[in-house]
Image (cartoon, coloured by chain):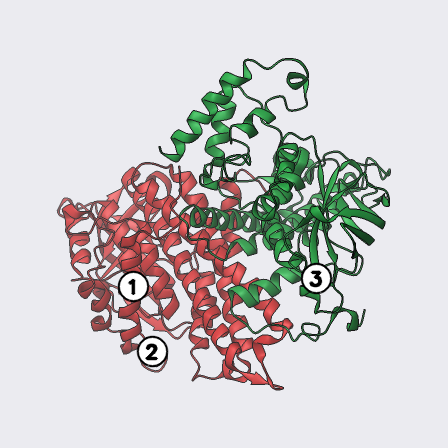
Amino acid sequence: MSEHARIDEAVAAATAAAAGLTGAEAEARAPHAGLLYDYGLAWVNFPRGAGGLGVSASLQDYADAAVDAAGLHRPDPHDNAIGFGMAAPTIAAYGTAEQKTWLRRIYTLETIVCQLFSEPGAGSDLAAVATKAVRDGDTYRVTGQKVWTSGAHNADLAILIARTDPSVPKHRGLSYFLLDMHAPGVETRGLRQITGEAEFNEVFLTDVPVPASMRLGEPGEGWKIANTTLNNERVAIGGGAPREGGMLGVVTRAWREQPEVRDPLLHDELMRLWVESEAARMLGERTAQQVAAGQPGPEGSGAKLSFARNAQQLSALDVRMRGVDGLRHDSYEMRRPEHYSMTGRTPVYRYLRAKGNSIEGGTSEIIRNIIAERVLGLPGEHRTDKDLPFKDLPR
Amino acid sequence: MTIEMLDTELAADLRRTVRAFLTERCDPGTVAEVYDDPAIASRELNDGWARELGLAGLLVPEADGGAGASLAEAAVVAHAIGRHAAPLRFLTSGVIATTLATRAGDRDLAAALAAGDRYAAVAFPATSPTLNSGLAAATASNADEAGTAHVSGTIAGVMEAAGADDLIAVLGSGEDTTIVVIDPAEARILPFLSLDETRRLADITVENAAARIVATGPQAVAAVEAATLAGQVALAAELAGTAAQALSTTLDYVRTRVQFGRAVGSYQAIKHRLADLWLAVSQADAAATYAAQTAANWQRGDEDLREARICALTALAYAAPVAVQAAEEAVQLHGGNGMTWEYPIHLLLKRAKAGELTLGHPAANRAALAELTELPVW
């Protein structure tokens, strides 16, 4: 049976089963999610029994469209972004049978996941994580501080990297855990940003018990497994993106609809950014076609760089072209946004928020290093910390 | 409409064939000689691409003896030529003049160009965003001379006019647009030394010269639109090729050049500049391909002209400054070597800088784009 036919068959079976839904399940936040998981339509590339059908990941769009056409409600991945984008693929790849039972709860939004990776002393240099996980019988005791954790205040489960062996070089002493965010010793505090609001948290871990059965992979494999997760974090590659999407759309809409923002001195800059954004979109188109043709090129690593630069320059133009109105703002109040949009609210908000685009998910400087070394084949940075035991590193 | 961004097997073959030809005949040493002896850019050298590879007729319909290919293929050829800064008449004769002759309905000239028997130049100032010659015309009143115009005026800086067998000129605008062919013997053609000698410029003066009218009115307008688009698409691809070559040459250099005991390319100050440049060059390449494919879709009747023009202007306005940036970075990052005649970098710099101004400088092309996208200045 073809991969498409396997999907069609699963959708038909799920549709039939959905007709019999009653009671609590039908009332749930994502009423069909459990069924979709059970029939292998959650992540079609995962194995049967783990939410998938063992078909190509490129068929997820096909499956989603078929599910939608059948009138079944898929959960919104944005409601559990870390769970869908990072935790699920990692658990599917490295989890034990017991750990894989989390997959269904993640898909049905019963278990919301956050990520405990970055620390105050381990940002770009993520392998310098200092949070300790000390084994005590069947339990690890975890102590340390994590930062930039989005959604920690709503999360039930965390993916965590922590140091289990400080006597070996830093990349080799890390282990990967699933941590219960409701466990004793977990304290979450909102981290207020330059916009006033707190999308992220600091998470303080004090002697938090984590059962050894919640460790993914072997001790010391944390770095390798974390890289699987980070590869999944990469911004989805933008094929088929529309012209004048995102921040460019905000600026061109205003330019067309509000003649008072048309400052002739800014016109060429607007057009330069229009051209830049189009060129980036066209490269995205090529990257997407390379991926679809099974020949992923290196261009994907550049997409985030141009996205950040264009968003920052456009949001700066957005403020500049509106005169005093460019300075008007709605609120600096500390709040915890459930959802946020880079292109929403005021020019002030967009300008400030866009500053994060070149920092979050890999700074532009680190991405330039990666391009230079992995794409262009230039020699690596001189590193003093690679072979020393973690405990002997200057910190 | 899906835009095909990856080389088909045919395109990859074409790319390999043209690169092999250029590697053999247009190595940097040969190209540099053009600056001392313009005769290097000979008819024989041009016959290599035009006749031996049969690319003269690339854009001519099969019925007129051509290959009936599209601007997608022309862009592949132009990209390779840009990499070598090759002193060839592909852009001027093979693309712009050939498109103009074909669309104007001059089948004899199109066939002669397609066979590589003749080379033509279009008489407009190299830096102009339009193909208009600016010549004044007095149409013959004598019945014997129907189909002839008498043209007068001077056109500064025409690309590859010297040595052309035919000069094609666009007169007037709008409904009054007329396309004529002038015998070079009727014109005073004064080549002058310019920044980029791989594409020579000349001032042309004609005084009441007899010119053969080949198209007027709507057909002439349509021919000029097609030839302008073709020129923009091919030049964008050329500039993307020049940029790519400047980057790869520089990468080779900084990987092996050692100072302070380390490869120069291991310093972060250099790496970050080259990472940024790589992204810009990749985007220029993608924009040029996107524009060529969109133009090809238009040629097949699957896309409207406005969209093809938007993509062509985008590609040209983006690729032109990137080519200059790439060539300037190449000069800087080659250190003292970048300033020498011996290293081929100056060939790329000259080609890129002159190319940046060809068919309109980037700000002029951005202004044209603003009209098409309805983003007015005021």
Where does the C terminus of chain B fall, quadrant-wise? top right
Q: Position of residue B82 (x, y in %)?
A: 38, 65
Quick one: which residue is furthest to the left in this view?
Answer: B144
Q: Which chain is red?
A: B
Give neighbour class at mark 1: few <14, some 14-19, many 20+ (Cα, 10 Å): some
Task: Please give the label number shown on residue A127.
Answer: 3
For disc 2, the chain is B
Q: In terms of secondary structure, where does tag 1 sit?
A: helix
Q: Are marks 1 and 2 in contact (CB under 8 Å)?
A: no
What amino acid is at disc 3?
A: Ala
Q: In terms of secondary structure, where does tag 2 sit?
A: loop
Please state which of residues B347 and B165 is positioned toward the viewer in this rendering. Answer: B347
Q: Position of residue B359 (x, y in %)?
A: 42, 56
Q: Position of residue A228 (x, y in %)?
A: 59, 52
- Compute the Cα span from label 3 to label 1: 44 Å
- Compute the Cα span from label 3 to label 2: 56 Å
| Residue A258 in view | no
Do discs 3 and 1 belong to a common subunit?
A: no
Do discs 3 and 2 belong to a common subunit?
A: no
Whether B349 is drawn above or below A265: the answer is below
For disc 3, the chain is A
Q: Are marks 3 and 2 in contact (CB under 8 Å)?
A: no
Do discs 1 and 2 belong to a common subunit?
A: yes
Task: Please give the label number shown on residue B25.
Answer: none
What amino acid is at disc 2?
A: Val
Single out the mark in the foreground, 1 or 2. 1
Q: In terms of secondary structure, where does tag 3 sit?
A: helix
Whether A129 is drawn above or below B20: the answer is above
Which residue is under mark 1? B16
Check the rendered structure and report the hue given to chain A: green
Which residue is under mark 2? B34
